[in-house]
Image (spheres, coloured by chain):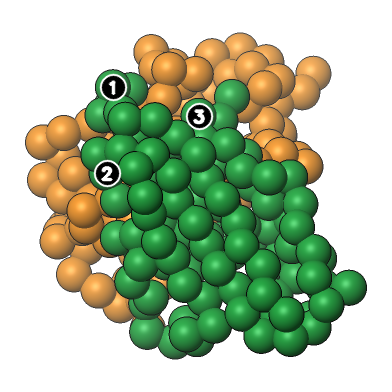
Amino acid sequence: QSVLTQPPSVSAAPGQKVTISCSGSSSNIGNNYVSWYQQLPGTAPKLLIYDNNKRPSGIPDRFSGSKSGTSGTLGITGLQTGDEADYYCATWDSSLSGYVFGTGTKVTVL
Amino acid sequence: EVQLVESGGGLVKPGGSLRLSCAASGFTFTNYGMNWVRQAPGKGLEWVSTITSTSGHIYYADSVKGRFTISRDNAGNSLYLQMNSLRAEDTAVYYCVRILQPSAMGVWGHGTTVTVSS
């Protein structure tokens, strides 16, 4: 099962903001970088945020990331219908010597 | 254009074997560590295995340790996953992923589907 905990779902109206939390421990988020992935329906995941708060080229600044202690957070502002997707956090776990993913969060635009 | 193209998926009986391949193009393959990540039907993402650029370090999820073997051919720009003793719970879409150092997964393939069923 997933080591990182995310809320199952979040929703907001178009133009609004949502935040998604990712809770871990000292062996994973506490001592390693957090990354975030967007998975649109029927497609492969795509990197949104890496190294806690960096965006790959082509990712709009409506997407932001942060980390505090053993938790990471993804923020999406100016919500659009095209943002409806599943979002996952991930990091390296030093105790497990492997990557761990979050449980996933479904974003719904009302 | 950076591309990862998986192949080798299919239907296999429990206890059987399958070898997945991932053809990489558009970048210097030897410079990157690689992952296999899977997603069971209707479920979340699960990391399977990691291999560093020179195959010097290899890691496996506990769920596949002893049954799966990751390898790479840098001269042929290819990544592999040999899967033995397959179980129903190994049924999933398997993604080939390029690592963005130190620990992000920067580029994903489209995936190949493995179904383990009698």
In the rendered image, residue B73, in percent from the top left (x then y), is placed at 22, 49
Query: How far apart are labels 1 and 2 at the CA level?
Result: 12 Å
Which residue position holds label 1? A95
Which residue position holds label 3? A3
Query: How far apart are labels 1 and 3 at the CA level?
Result: 12 Å
Quarter of the image for residue B107 reads bottom left
Marks 2 & 3 on one chain: yes
In the rendered image, residue A27, in percent from the top left (x then y), is placed at 30, 28
The reply to whether residue B12 is in sight is no
Marks 1 & 2 on one chain: yes
Which chain is disc 3 placed on? A
Amino acid residing under circle 1: Ser
The reply to whether residue A83 is in sight is yes
In the rendered image, residue B23, in percent from the top left (x then y), is placed at 38, 60
The answer to which of marks 1 and 3 sits earlier in the sequence is: 3
Which chain is disc 2 placed on? A
